[in-house]
Amino acid sequence: MKIDAKIEFSDEVAEKLDRNWIRVPVDIDYVEDNEDSVKTWVMNELEEMFSQAFNYEDFKITNMDEVLEEIKFDEFEDKIN
């Protein structure tokens, strides 16, 4: 299952890409329920989308709590089914 991470770029990156934000689908079956895992997934997706390197300071996931909650719920469902 995938959930969209809402990404807000830093000012420098936003100027370079000519956009302030983007949605990145996160496949919750392949990430752990912690911020670093989600950020790494998003960073890798951004690098693939834009063919350039990114680091954690280049973007902010504005709905991180929602993404983590969905991952935890999915893991909970897997345990009870």
Image (spheres, rainbow, N blue to C red):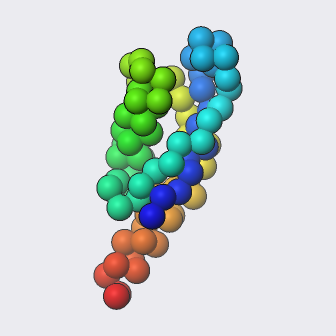
| Residue found at x 46% / y 50% | 26
Residue situated in front as seen by the camera: 80 or 1: 1
- Most extreme residue toward the bottom, as rendered? 81
**Image side of residue 63 versus residue 45, left or right:** right
User: In the figure, residue 1 lies in which quadrant?
Assistant: bottom left
**Image side of residue 21 versus residue 58, left or right:** right
| Residue 46 vertical position relative to residue 73 in the rendered view, above or below | above
Please provide percent x and percent y for residue 22: 62, 35
Placement of the C terminus among the 4 image quadrants: bottom left
Please provide percent x and percent y for residue 52: 42, 18
| Residue 4 vertical position relative to residue 36 in the rendered view, above or below | below
User: In the figure, residue 10 lies in which quadrant?
Assistant: top right
Please provide percent x and percent y for residue 29: 35, 61
| Residue found at x 36% / y 38% | 40
Residue 43 visible in the displayed image? no
| Labels in figure, total | 0
Residue situated in front as seen by the camera: 37 or 3: 3
Residue 9 visible in the displayed image? yes
| Residue found at x 42% / y 36% | 45
Please provide percent x and percent y for residue 59: 54, 29
| Residue found at x 38% / y 42% | 41
| Residue 14 vertical position relative to residue 39 in the rendered view, above or below | above
